Amino acid sequence: MSTLQGATVLVTGGAGFIGSQLVRELLDREVASLVVVDNFVNGRRENIEERMADPRLTLLEADIRSDVALDALRGIDVVFHLACLGVRHSLHAPRENHEVNATATLELLERARHESVQRFVHVSSSEVFGTAQYAPMDERHPTWPETVYGGAKLAGEAYARAAFRTHGMPTVVVRPFNTYGPRSHFEGDSGEVIPRTIVRVLNELPPLVYGDGEQTRDFMHVRDTARGLAMIAECDEAVGETINFGSGSEISINELARTVASAAGRTEIEPTYLEARPGDVRRLLVDGSHMHDLTGFTPEVSFGDGIEELVAWFQTRPESPEAMLTRIEERNWLVGAGNEESK
């Protein structure tokens, strides 16, 4: 029997962008029961609504800082900890960002240890690195985060590693690079570059590019991300490890804007360039060899195919492109931008 088949599983942030795809992946892998903890500051009920009829799925509306969330760890075999507040949020609310991303992680680890959880997968972020000092970036790449978000995520990593080294707790730290796909966020301070660009192009508006557009990211489709997270949980050799996780392809923001415009049939649209965003890293590119060596994982969805699929997904949303556009904040790192939905 695998780690997940027949297991009782808890996913924090399970109604968010990546979390809701992971919920689908886990239910398809025949877990015995699945508890989602989400306070819907970041997640959306509709992200998992289609799976709520499954009797194995339980939804708890709770902040991960609460006793309700901690008590949910009783009887749990495997934890996937995804709940967080994002990069732009940390620029206008650093203390709350730290409380959720770092302090709450420590509290969850401590309770999970006392509840004898068999596997704790801490989902960190490539933002712990800051800008690439060399590429591709392996697990030994220096960590020089440029935001409180990156710093808080790094603290959460350290707590997970300490739980393993001090107490032998079966933790795994995984650092996804840049994930995109259906249910990604365009709105408020959690809005990300790909969905924001798609919404603008669907409204026949130019993409907004901050800086010169030559900054690069390593984008991986959310289905690949969810599949990889499940594979990590099922890999005994991953316990105690820190694992970088991405596509291994480097895409500039300028190239991204061209790809979205082409997928939407609006190749004539040219970007509008604005001043660079604060805390924006210059380059990210994963060295995924450790992940592959441990699990055999390779991404399946190409960037071009993934963007075409995501454009089509946005085109079929009940909410019109015009309505979605009203919820985009041009400078979503400023105080008051809001954080209604985040991953």
Image (cartoon, rainbow, N blue to C red):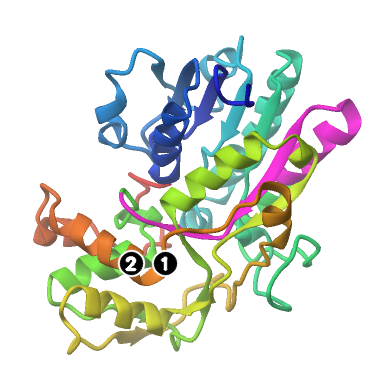
Task: Say whether residue 336 is visible.
Answer: no
Looking at the rendering, which quadrant does residue 307 occupy? Answer: bottom left
Looking at the rendering, which quadrant does residue 340 occupy? Answer: top left
Residue, disc 2: 305
Give, as a single range, the part of the protein colored magenta: 156-182
Alpha carbon separation for disc pair 2 and 1? 5 Å
Residue depicted at x 90% and y 31%: 166
The label shown at residue 302 is 1
Amino acid marked by disc 2: Asp
Residue 186 percent across, percent down from the top left: 30, 58
* Closer to us: 48 or 336: 48
Name the secondary structure under disc 1: loop
Residue depicted at x 61% and y 44%: 98
Amino acid marked by disc 1: Ser
Q: State whether residue 204 is above or below residue 46.
A: below
Q: State whether residue 99 is above or below residue 169.
A: below
Residue 258 percent across, percent down from the top left: 31, 83
Q: Residues within 10 Å of mark 1 (few under 14, many from 20)?
A: few
Residue 13 percent across, percent down from the top left: 47, 35
Residue depicted at x 58% and y 26%: 4
